[in-house]
Amino acid sequence: MRKHAVLLIEASPLFRDALVSVLHQLGYSVSTCQPADTRPGKDKHPLLVLLDVATFVGALEDLSNTVVCYSRAAPLLLLGREDRIEEVVAGLKAGALGFVRHSASKTEFQDAIRAVASGRAYCDSTIFRRIMKLLPGIGYLKETKLTKREQDVLQYLALGQANKDIAQKLTLSVQAIKVHVSNLLRKIGVPNRGGLTLYAVTHGFAASPQSA
């Protein structure tokens, strides 16, 4: 039996068939949709959404809107060429949790899927360094002030922890964690937990947290 489906958003029929074949070889079932589809199907419950940024060259707003929409259904992994940093940054800003190159090996591809599906950020180190140089343009709210407890919650989010696990580690209620997550989304100015994870990684909050 195959694992839960990867939802693949890919415009090119040829590349879509190739990706489906690779994903099947890695043990995943695959459902596909066109970039023009504006909302996930109600019958789709993917482990992960895989989106090829090459589909959106020169259409950053469409890319951002698509990422915002589909990242609500499942963690979203971007796929693309390493020279398309503008599209990668736009996708990460909108809530994608990671990026893997078209030229990645099957092992790297599998590692990226596993990381993002579990709620952890993933990015090739070379691409990550290039993205870091563009941080002033990523557009997070400036001078964001987080409380100590918000910082603790953010660190656990960066590790892919669920609300109930964070609540247990910090000896708080699940409802309290939900409030902290909502406050973090508002303060940092990102649409979802993927954006919080990226913020944590790029702002030094991804180290192992210490309980207060």
Image (spheres, helix red, strand yellow):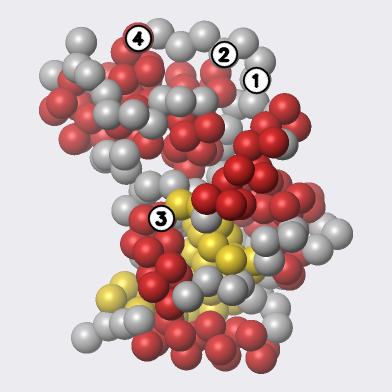
How far apart are the alpha carbons under marks 2 and 3?
25 Å
Q: Is label 2 in contact with label 3 (beta carbons under 8 Å)?
A: no
Q: Is residue 202 above or below residue 65?
A: above
Q: Which residue is mark 1?
A: 141
How far apart are the alpha carbons under marks 2 and 1?
6 Å
Q: Is label 4 in contact with label 3 (beta carbons under 8 Å)?
A: no
Q: Which residue is mark 3?
A: 116
- Residue situated in front as seen by the camera: 52 or 126: 126
Report x, y in % for residue 119: 36, 48
Q: Which residue is mark 4?
A: 148
Residues packed near mark 2 inside 10 Å, few (<14), some (14 to 19) or many (20 plus): few
- Residue situated in front as seen by the camera: 171 or 83: 83
- Residue situated in front as seen by the camera: 35 or 160: 160
**Nearest to N terminus: mark 3 or mark 1:** 3
Indicate the amino acid at tag 3. Val
Q: Which residue is mark 2?
A: 144
Question: Which residue does the image show at 64% across and 85% down from the upper left?
Answer: 15
Indicate the amino acid at tag 4. Lys
Which numbered marker is on residue 57? none
Q: Is residue 136 above or below residue 143?
A: below
